[in-house]
Amino acid sequence: MSASPPTRRRAPPFRPLFSLTLAYFAGFFLLFCLLIVAPALVQVAREGEPSEQMQVRAQSAAHDAIQGRLPLALIGALVLTGIGVYARALPGLRDGDSQR
């Protein structure tokens, strides 16, 4: 009776789920910030030709638009990331191997 050689188990593949989740969160946060600031920047852009003064006005308009609304962008990014993870709609986080 000969013993069979031990079978070698495969190492599980590397899946950077936490890193991908953070990347999606950061991307959604920047998207929400852009959506909050965009109307103010469009209004400044329609006022005239590009110049140093326009750049200063655009920075001021962006600062005024985002001031006080940063928590809204943060909460929106958190909710959208959570929904994407729960629904398994985000690429890289769709694997059915993980258990809930």
Image (spheres, rainbow, N blue to C red):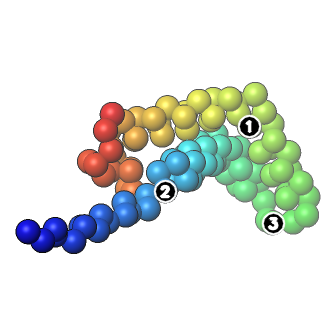
Q: Position of residue 36 (x, y in %)?
A: 64, 40
Q: Amino acid at mark 2?
A: Pro
Residue drawn at x 80%, y 37% as measured from the top left? 64
Determine the image quadrant of residue 47: bottom right
Above or below — where is 12 with respect to 25? below
Instruction: Report, in whole angstroms, how far the alpha carbon at label 2 lies from the one at label 3.
Output: 43 Å
Nearest the viewer among 35 and 93 is 93
Q: Which residue is mark 1?
A: 66
Secondary structure found at label 3: loop
Q: Which residue is mark 2?
A: 16
Residue drawn at x 39%, y 57% as measured from the top left? 92
Secondary structure found at label 1: helix
Numbered tag placed on residue 50 in the rendering = 3
Q: Residues within 10 Å of mark 2 (few under 14, many from 20)?
A: few
Q: Amino acid at mark 3?
A: Pro
Q: Quadrant of the N terminus?
A: bottom left
Nearest the viewer among 94 and 29 is 94
Is residue 35 visible in the rendered image? The answer is no
Q: Earlier in the sequence, mark 2 or mark 3?
A: 2
Disc 2 and disc 3 in contact, CB within 8 angstroms: no
Residue drawn at x 59%, y 30% as measured from the top left? 75
Instruction: Report, in whole angstroms, how far the alpha carbon at label 2 lies from the one at label 1.
Output: 32 Å
